[in-house]
Amino acid sequence: MSRMLRYVPDAARALQQARVQGAQAHLLGPVTSKAEALDAIGTALSFPAWYGRNLDALYDCLLDLSWQPTGEHMLVWAGHRQLENADPDGYRAVLAVLDAATNPERPLSVVLADA
């Protein structure tokens, strides 16, 4: 498994754990298309207006996060399998970007939750 992505059964527990660890927690709900995923991630992480809502822009924003408070950030994606079921190729593409977009100066982890 990648350094950045991990799987958990319960989003609420993951959010609680993030807060206990002092991380900024960001919740992303179920989506059924790649376009919805790009929009939802941008909303969850408060991406700036210039965010282009494509995979390249997602990667760039995930690497930057300069508009967010310093420290650890955790993106919790509840119901991630809905996108996998609706659009397997889009799901894999979004996951690949999430996995590739590591930033040691502004740590971001992604938790994929079933519910």
Image (cartoon, rainbow, N blue to C red):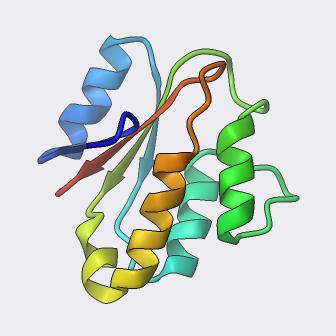
- Asked if 106 appears above or below 49 in the picture, the reply is above
What is the x, y in percent for residue 62? 65, 44
Position of residue 98 measured from the top left corner of the image (x, y, whole percent): 50, 52
Q: Residue furthest left?
A: 9
Q: Position of residue 114 (x, y in %)?
A: 17, 57
- Foreground residue among 106 and 31: 106
Question: Which quadrant: the N terminus?
Answer: top left
> Residue 91 vs residue 52: left or right?
left
Number of disc labels: 0
Q: Quadrant of the C terminus?
A: bottom left
Q: Residue furthest right?
A: 50
Answer whether residue 46 is visible to the viewer in this image: no
Q: Quadrant of residue 54?
A: bottom right
Question: What residue appears at the point 40 percent right and 37 percent down from the top-left corner?
Answer: 4
Residue situated furthest bottom in the rendering: 86
Residue at image location 40% in from the left, 71% down from the top = 92
In the displayed structure image, the side of residue 73 where residue 61 appears, left or right: right
Whether residue 87 is situated above or below residue 23 in the rendered picture: below
Q: Residue at x 72, y 48 (%)?
A: 61
Residue 93, visible in the rendered structure: yes
Q: Position of residue 88 (x, y in %)?
A: 33, 82
> Which residue is found at the position 56% from the left and 36% from the top?
102
